[in-house]
C-alpha cells in the first residue's frame, strides 16, 4: 500500500473546535452551504443503476436529487424538481423508467433530462424549452462509487481526495459488489461528534471490547492524507478468517477511511465487502446515520453475517458515546476540549471545518 500521508501527533496545547459549533443551529445553516453543498457527497453504488432507465433518489444538503442512467448509458444526476411548478418529480426511492413524468400537470422528461412533452403548453408560442429541462447536478463515479456535488465549480472528484481512489483501486472486487442493504439510525448528536469519534481510537479499549479482541491494536495506525484519512491494523493471528495474504499489504485487519466531510468507508478482510457510513444532519443536534452494506451477493454467508453483526455492534457502542457527548456540548461547563497526541486525525477534521466556515482557531 502506498499512502502519501502523515502520522504527526496533535499537540496538547491545541484545543478542539468550540463546543458551540456542535450546539448552535446557525452554525449548521452555515455548514449546509459551505460544507455540504460544496463537497462531493456519496449517493450510491454502481450496482443500483447498471441498466438504462435504472434510477434512485436521495437528498444532498437538503436538496432532492435524482440519479438515472440514460438510454445512451450515461449516468446523470438532476435536481428532483419539476421545472413547471417545483413539484418533486420522482417519488420512488428507486426503480426503472423509460420516461419521467411529473404527477402534477403531467409534463414528461427524457432520461437525459430534456423535456419530452408539456401538455398544458400545447398552444403557447413563447414556451421556452430550454427552461423546461431538468436542472442537472455534477456527478462522478470512481471505484464503483457514485458521488454528486451541488457546486458547479468544485474540483473534480479524483483530485479532491489525494491518492484515495488509487488506494481504493487496489481492491479488485469493488466492481463485483452489490448494495445488499441500507439502514438508517437517528442519532441524538451533532454530525461532527460522530466524525470525531470515528477519527480516533483512544476510546477503543474502553468502548469496543469486541473490536479490541479481534484486532492487534499494537499495530494500529492513523494516517492523515489530503482531505481524507485512513486508519487500521492487522487481525490478531488466532482471529484471522478467509484468505488473507499477510504479506500483501499493511492493515489487513481492516481499513477505515474517512473522506471530508461526512463519509466513512470500511473494508474488512475476507470475502469482498465494503460498508459506508454517512452522517447527515437533521438539525444541529440530531443526525441521520446512513449505513450501506456492499457484499458480493445478497445471500450472505455465515462469515459475512457475523461481520455485519460485528460492525453494527461497534457502531451502537459509538452512538451511545456521541449522544452522551452532546449533553456536555450544551452545558456551560467547558467551552472546548483537548487533543491527545494520537488524535491528530480529529485535529485535521477540525482544521478543515474552521477553514470551511472561515473561523479563526
Ligand atoms: S408541476 Fe410538474 S407538470 Fe406542473
Ligand atoms: Fe468507536
Image: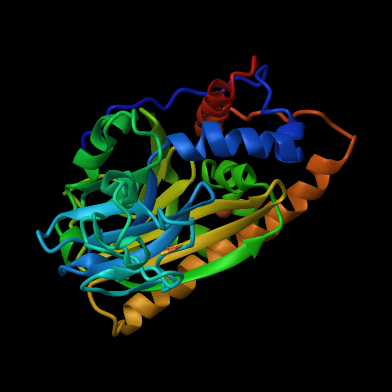
Q: Is residue 248 above or below residue 122?
A: above
Q: Is residue 280 above or below residue 21?
A: below
Position of the N terminus by quadrant: top left
Question: Which residue is at the front of the view, 283 or 226?
Answer: 283
Residue 11: x %, y % from top left: 60, 19
Q: Is residue 52 left or right of residue 298?
A: left
Residue shown at the point (29%, 50%) measured from the top left: 125
17 is higher (above) or lower (below) than 65: above
Does residue 254 appear in this view? Answer: no
**Does residue 204 appear to the left or right of 175 in the view shown?**
right
Residue at image position (31%, 63%) is 118
- Decide which of 268, 158 is in the foreground and name it: 158
Return the x and y of residue 73 as percentages of the image width and height. Answer: 11, 60
Residue positioned most to the right: 332
In the rendered structure, the answer to whether residue 6 lies left or right of residue 143 reads right
Outermost residue, top side: 360
How many discs mark residues in the rendered view?
0
Residue 56 or residue 224, whichever sits in front: 56
How was this image coloured? Answer: rainbow
Residue 358 visible, this orientation: yes
Q: For residue 32, which quarter of the picture?
A: top right
Q: Position of residue 267 (x, y in %)?
A: 33, 57
User: Residue at the location (17% across, 67% down)?
Assistant: 50
- Name the one closer to the observer, 259 or 35: 35
Q: Quadrant of the C terminus?
A: top right
Kindly identify the residue that appears in the image at 30 percent across and 60 percent down.
123
Amino acid at each position: 500500500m502506498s499512502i502519501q500521508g502523515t502520522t504527526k501527533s496533535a499537540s496538547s496545547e491545541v484545543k478542539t473546535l468550540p463546543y458551540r459549533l456542535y450546539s448552535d443551529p446557525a452554525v449548521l445553516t452555515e455548514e449546509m452551504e459551505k460544507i455540504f453543498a460544496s463537497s462531493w457527497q456519496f449517493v450510491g453504488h454502481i450496482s443500483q443503476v447498471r441498466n438504462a432507465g435504472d434510477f434512485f433518489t436521495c437528498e444532498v444538503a437538503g436538496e432532492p436529487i435524482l440519479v438515472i442512467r440514460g438510454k445512451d448509458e450515461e449516468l446523470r444526476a438532476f435536481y428532483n424538481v419539476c421545472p413547471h411548478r417545483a413539484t418533486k418529480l420522482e417519488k420512488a426511492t428507486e426503480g426503472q423508467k423509460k420516461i419521467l413524468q411529473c404527477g402534477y400537470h403531467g409534463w414528461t422528461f427524457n432520461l437525459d433530462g430534456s423535456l419530452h412533452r408539456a401538455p398544458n403548453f400545447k398552444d403557447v408560442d413563447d414556451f421556452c424549452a430550454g427552461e423546461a429541462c431538468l436542472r442537472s447536478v455534477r456527478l462522478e463515479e470512481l471505484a464503483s462509487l457514485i458521488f454528486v456535488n451541488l457546486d458547479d465549480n468544485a474540483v473534480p472528484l479524483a483530485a479532491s481526495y489525494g491518492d484515495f481512489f488509487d488506494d481504493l483501486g487496489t481492491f479488485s472486487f469493488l466492481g463485483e459488489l452489490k448494495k445488499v442493504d441500507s439502514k438508517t439510525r437517528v442519532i441524538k448528536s451533532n454530525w461532527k461528534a460522530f466524525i470525531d469519534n470515528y477519527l480516533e481510537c483512544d476510546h477503543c479499549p474502553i468502548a469496543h471490547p469486541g473490536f479490541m479482541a479481534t484486532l492487534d491494536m499494537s499495530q494500529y495506525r492513523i494516517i492523515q492524507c489530503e482531505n481524507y484519512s485512513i486508519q487500521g491494523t492487522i487481525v490478531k493471528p488466532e482471529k484471522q478468517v478467509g484468505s488473507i495474504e499477510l504479506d500483501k499489504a499493511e492493515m489487513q485487519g481492516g481499513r477505515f477511511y474517512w473522506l471530508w466531510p461526512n463519509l466513512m468507508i470500511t473494508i474488512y478482510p475476507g470475502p469482498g465487502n465494503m460498508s459506508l457510513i454517512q452522517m447527515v444532519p437533521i438539525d444541529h443536534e440530531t443526525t441521520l446515520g446512513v449505513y450501506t452494506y456492499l457484499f458480493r451477493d445478497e445471500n450472505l454467508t455465515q462469515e459475512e453475517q457475523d461481520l455485519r453483526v460485528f460492525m453494527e455492534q461497534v457502531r451502537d457502542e459509538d452512538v451511545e458515546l456521541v449522544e452522551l457527548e452532546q449533553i456536555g456540548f450544551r452545558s456551560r461547563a467547558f467551552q472546548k476540549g483537548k487533543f491527545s497526541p494520537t488524535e491528530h486525525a480529529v485535529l485535521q477534521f477540525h482544521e478543515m471545518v474552521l477553514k470551511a466556515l472561515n473561523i479563526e482557531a
